[in-house]
Image (spheres, rainbow, N blue to C red):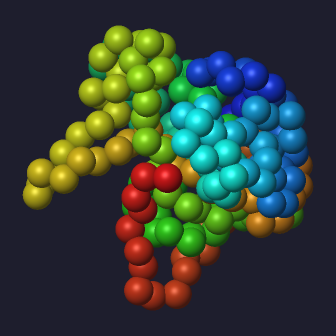
Amino acid sequence: MVAVSRDTGHAFSKPLEPSIRLLAGLGIEGDAHCGVTVKHRSRVAVDPTQPNLRQVHFIHEELLNELNAAGFNVAPGRMGENITTRGIDLLGLPVGARLKLGESAEVEITGLRNPCAQIEAFRPGLLKAVLGRDAEGRLVRKAGIMGIVLAGGDIRPGDAITVTLPAQPHRALDRV
């Protein structure tokens, strides 16, 4: 784990923290997106009772490196993620993959982050940079993955992340 972040408000970027606490069934203590029901403003406007499948947001450091090489100047936490990873193919994980974080925390992956217009306001051109097309012309979302907290615990930069895949057949991630 490279970095951990949280923010009590709905700002686009989240400040880095020395540690964060994951709460089972809720998300990250003190984060604006913590809760059983959805907290993202656009989703609340549609149906505030829908379950919160976006309690924790992960981005891989490799994406930040790619974006920085393209001149975007983004650091951990700046794209709104709670956890910045290194060396894990986040986008290649299937729905239901479980990430054990540190000593006791566990998150189940629910889907892809669907980048919104806020990303463009943060850095012009960034929306296009985090969207692409695969060989078949299908949209590829690279702005991270989302999950729900199964087991709570404190995590910090440097903690190990262990991936457990669900039983086959695997279902590819889609936006949540």
Q: Residue furthest bottom?
A: 168
> Which of the two residues, 122 or 91, is positioned nearer the viewer here?
122
Image quadrant in which you'd find residue 66: top left
**Drawn side of residue 2 relative to residue 168, left or right:** right
- In percent of width and height, residue 52 lies at 67, 53
**Drawn side of residue 68 relative to residue 149, left or right:** left
Query: Is residue 61 visible in this depiction of the protein?
Result: yes
Tell me which residue sits at (19%, 53%) in the image.
138
**Drawn side of residue 90 relative to residue 38, left or right:** left
Tell me which residue sits at (49%, 57%) in the image.
111
Tell me which residue sits at (55%, 42%) in the image.
46
Rendered position, 107 above or below 176? below
Query: Is residue 57 visible in this depiction of the protein?
Result: no
> Which of the two residues, 89 or 35, is positioned nearer the viewer here?
35
Image quadrant in which you'd find residue 165: bottom right
Rendered position, 138 above or below 41? below
